[in-house]
Amino acid sequence: MAFALSTMRLSSGAFEDGGAIPVKHTGEGDDLSPALAWQDVPKGTKGFAVICHDPDAPLVQNGAYGFVHWVLYNLPASTTSLEEASGTGTRGKNDFGKLGYGGPMPPEGHGEHRYYFWVLALDKATGLPEGLKLHDLLVQVEPHLLGMNRLVGTYQRG
């Protein structure tokens, strides 16, 4: 399946789709990953991956624009939510060069950025090693993608 939106729904108790991400989930706050929940999972799902990407960042890497804030994978099919500051799953490397979540922190004076939180449903449970960057994860999971959807939050540096 190509990378295309599915009927799966992703939400957060921290912010509404299109709404502002609270400071505690940013690099200016406590840098805690927000709680997420998903439903209407595609039939046959055996695992999940979660990504957070800022397409508004003025950076070109791997032929694409933006900045990767979170890469999380090896989530079993029984996982349909993540708590705030979750330790569930295997942490990939974000564009800060660190493992796990790195909250929004656009350059000063750069205005409001959009942050896309994605959940990917896979037809195979994964046992991938810690530290994969986004591109490497996508190469591994694309052949197993059953569906995906996103939740978009915004943040403007204070």
Image (tube, rainbow, N blue to C red):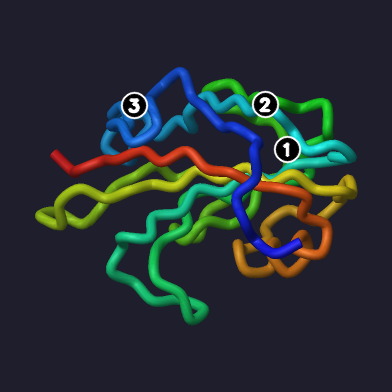
Kindly identify the residue that appears in the image at 15 percent across and 57 percent down.
Answer: 110
148 w.r.t. 68: above or below: above
Give x and y (percent) for residue 44.
89, 40
Is 23 situated above or below 117? above
Q: Dot 2 lies on which element?
A: strand
Work out whether mark 2 precedes mark 1 in sequence or the reverse, and give the earlier one: 2
Query: On the image, numbered disc 3 is attached to which residue?
Result: 24
Q: N-terminal of the two: label 2 or label 3?
A: 3
Amino acid type at mark 1: Gly
Contact between labelled residues 1 and 3, with CB atoms less than 8 Å apart: no
- The residue sitting at the front extreme is 7
Figure quadrant of residue 72: top right
The amino acid type, in three-letter code, at marker 2 is: Gln
Tell me the quadrant of the picture where the N terminus can be found: bottom right
Q: How many marks?
A: 3
Q: Who is closer to the viewer here, 71 or 43?
A: 43
N-terminal of the pair, mark 3 or mark 1, is 3
Image location (x, y in percent) of residue 100:
57, 45
Furthest residue in direction top, as rendered: 13
**Residue 43 image position (x, y, % from top left):** 85, 36
73 lies left or right of 122: left
Q: Residues within 10 Å of mark 1 (few under 14, many from 20)?
A: some
Residue topped by disc 1: 89
Q: Which mark is residue 39?
A: 2
**Circle 3 SS class:** helix
x 20%, y 43%: residue? 156
CA separation, marks 2 and 3? Answer: 25 Å
The kind of secondary structure element at disc 1 is loop
